[in-house]
Amino acid sequence: MKRSPSKHRLKFFLFFLLIALGLVFWLVPSQDWKASFFQEFFSPVFALFEKSEDLAGAIPPKLSQEVSQAEQIENLQIQVQSLENKLFRVEAQLQSLSEAKGLEAWAKSKTFSGQVARVLVQDVSSHRQSLMINRGASSGLKRGQAVLAREALVGRVDQVWNKTARVLLINDQLSRVDVQTQASKARGSLHGSGGALDLERAPYVTYAEYFDQKVPLEEGELLLTSGQDGLFPPGLPVAKLLKVEKDSTGLFWEGQARPLVELSQLSTLWVLSDSGSIKQGSL
């Protein structure tokens, strides 16, 4: 890249200027003249620096005070936000602890052996409806154990690791629960629709089918686990019928049902330690 001619001229000028100044200082022995020359030559430069310092220090006190106050306000806002976040976490922990105590008291009153588990992650994909909990093989969990929330069945342990486990929810497409109605004792199958776990989900997240059409079936009936599938103990509340009609063959009832708890808002669960018999109506 070629250098600009003006830059060359400037360098030559500075070079000759330095030589000239050196000759003057060497040839002129008078110290007073040298001091006078030095002052006249460099005083404009010093004056420029002094002026810049004066300008830097000439910020009005009021403006400086306003800047300081703005910084203090910003720092206070950051501290307030941090305290609010801590308060939110503490409230969430207290709520989780309260739910855990409530579940333990309820399970003790029903003589249900098991343990409390906390929800870590919700899988809200369109393929799977499941949860990750903070209990695993180290806590004695095994595949197939029933999982309850607020005295109702929400799923079963599907996969177990050392410190965590996956719970397959009853609205998962792979979920099948053998149920019977509380009033008429009509048996049928409840399976998931795969509805996404969000606050705007459709209310019909499970389907009930294969109920004998000879047994009367009504909307609003409570569905309980029958225990005939070998997966869940009998007598656990699961869902309520919202819509009932005969299937295309006319031999069976089918309908839509909704779980008794909001599956999108699960935080504390109770994992049954075994699939022992539970008396119907004890819940």
Image (cartoon, rainbow, N blue to C red):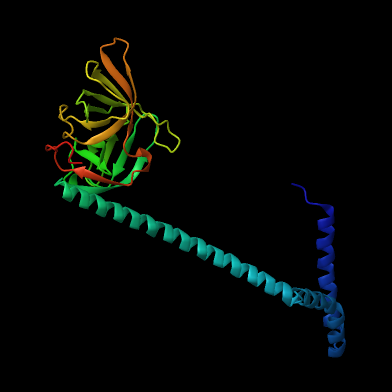
Q: Residue at x 84, y 53 (%)?
A: 5
Residue 190 in sight in this render? yes
Quadrant position of residue 211: top left
Q: Residue furthest top?
A: 249
Q: Nearer the viewer, residue 39 or 234?
A: 234
Quadrant position of residue 67: bottom right
Q: Nearer the viewer, residue 146 or 216?
A: 216
Depicted 172 relative to depicted 283: above or below: above
Residue 278 point in image, percent of width and height: 14, 38
Q: Residue at x 25, y 12 (%)?
A: 251
Residue 4 point in image, percent of width and height: 81, 52
Depicted 205 relative to depicted 209: above or below: below
* Quadrant position of the C terminus in the picture: top left
How many discs mark residues in the rendered view?
A: 0
Depicted 263 relative to depicted 94: above or below: above
Residue 222 point in image, percent of width and height: 27, 32
Residue 23 in sight in this render? no
Q: Residue furthest left?
A: 276
Residue 42 point in image, percent of width and height: 83, 78
Q: Residue at x 24, y 36 (%)?
A: 237
Q: Nearer the viewer, residue 103 or 11?
A: 103
